[in-house]
Amino acid sequence: MAEITTLREAIAGLVRDGDVVAMEGFTHLIPFAAGHEVLRQQRRNLTLVRMTPDVIYDQLIGAGCANKLIFSWGGNPGVGSLHRLRDAVEHDWPAPLQIQEHGHGDLANAYVAGASNLPFAVLRAYAGSDLPKHNDKIKFIQCPFTGESLAAVPAIRPDVAVIHAQKSDRKGNILLWGILGVQKEAVLAAKRAIVTVEEIVDELQAWPNACILPHWTVSAVCRVPGGGFPSYAHGYYERDNRFYQAWDAIARDRDTFQKWIKAHILDTDNFEEFRQVLAESVSQET
Amino acid sequence: MTLSAYTTNEIMTIAAARLLKNGAVCFVGIGLPSTAANLARLTHAPDIVLIYESGPIGAKPSILPLSIGDGNLAETADTVVSTPEIFRYWLQGGRVDVGFLGAAQIDRFANINTTVIGDYKKPGTRLPGAGGAPEIVSCAGQVVLVLKQSARGFVKKLDFVTSVGHLDGGDARGRLNLPGKGPVAVVTDLCLMEPDPATKELTVTQLHPGISAEQIRKATEWEIRFAPELKETPVPTKTELEILRDLERRTRLAHGNLTAA
């Protein structure tokens, strides 16, 4: 049953040290505000799951919140590398990061298996690839009916899924639209789910087959306008491509990164204050 | 039109776009492949269907997407489905004619590395990883690769095979029972390569105007083969260049002078 609460309380109550956490959103609706709050509350030893780690996990990894990453594409979209992820993998900084690497179709299927209460997913991929040699979670099985060889990967069952959506109503029914990614599957695969939303409205006014997560599938709903920034929320605001590019320089250097994290996240109270501090630091640069 | 009237990037994009037939269902990677696929849509292939792995089917973006899930892709698509659905029903379901992809490194059998340079456990350079490519190279009817040619990118031996091309050549794909035909062409800024029909080794079949065999040898770490009768890529037409430049100009304005990577 969804509790409508503050983001601080939701993260404090629902995300624990050592949890398997999936913060999903495929370029669109990335739950940055929630990611920041996890960082601000300094969770440790998290296993982070995400198809595209993006800047949200670059921040958490660089800040030492994670000891394992399950992912399928780890770049800064449209820009280049995620330098904090690379530094963790290449130089164990700030701590060793175990990685478990898949393809997109594979992870998408693994979430579906999790949501479907199946132990594993089956797909056509990886024949001839080196990925199964370095990831013992990718195996091959024989179809009991046709005899053909298929790839199998374990279901993803996060302790907590975290997503950002456009709207909820006052009961906590969640509506999202546009690029949907794997958010529905991540929430239904997880034991607990936190959803930040752009706004809470009286009526969702959605079509019958719109993507809705009923209130009883999520644990907490938090109103955080702009909570997907610097990614975008379809119908609300566009992706801040300049931030993604600026992140390259911030994350490239350890000191610059640490100072940025301290000033913008650790020393701010919430996402609104983060946006204010960021606006000030951007205006000083220009 | 003189040779200097277009750039090597432009002829690469245009040569790649020409390979896409009107009406083809095309699973598009971000960056160069996306530029070429949209150029095809705006020139000779108005009915091409562009699918992006983030979920848009039949995307007709007015500006090039900077990331794989840009809002413009969703707004201009015939429909937008979830990521599991894209991979399960549409790609694995066998509805994609062409996988149109970039790569960091390839070898002579068009196998792809987008994972790591050096040892996996002690990486020299960690690359972004697989994305959707392992599933695309398996399941798309055929695959076209677009990437700039250099000795660092066209290597004798890959440190890591992320996504398979023709493995060790011959009928290797058939032995593994892969549903799709695999790479049928590699388009670079210097030439077009196609797999030899029997050995599946990449062979230069077409040179871009003004490019020498020597330039291609220097930009390939393995001893590259050339077809006995080499064709020359037709010079970009005025229309192709105008449409491409207009698309890139609109994109630069919209993204604040950022370029798609």
Image: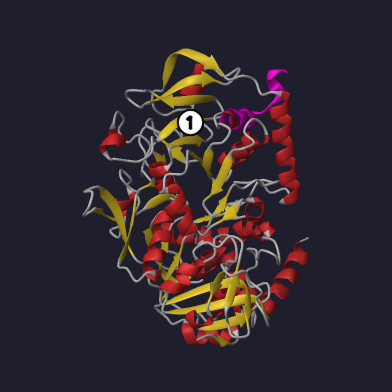
Q: Position of residue A67 (x, y in %)?
A: 40, 70
Q: Is residue A200 above or below residue B114?
A: below
Choose top left, top right, bottom left or bottom right for residue B236: top right
Choose top left, top right, bottom left or bottom right for residue A212: bottom right
Quarter of the image that includes the C terminus of chain A: bottom right
State the predominant SS element of the stretch in magenta. helix
Which residue is found at the position 28% from the left and 51% from the top?
Answer: A150
Q: Position of residue A3 (x, y in %)?
A: 55, 88
For this view, does A55 lie left or right of residue B137? right
For this view, does A58 lie left or right of residue B176? right
Segment colored magenta = B1-16
Mark 1 is surrounded, within 10 Å at the Cα level, by few (under 14), some (14 to 19) or many (20 or more) other residues, namely many
Depth order, front residue of B168/B197 = B197
Q: Amino acid at mark 1?
A: Val
Depth order, front residue of B186/B100 = B100
Which residue is found at the position 75% from the left and 71% from the top?
Answer: A280
Which residue is found at the position 75% from the left and 62% from the top?
Answer: A285
Q: Which residue is mark 1?
A: B186
Depth order, front residue of A143/B251 = A143
Q: Position of residue A123 (x, y in %)?
A: 34, 53
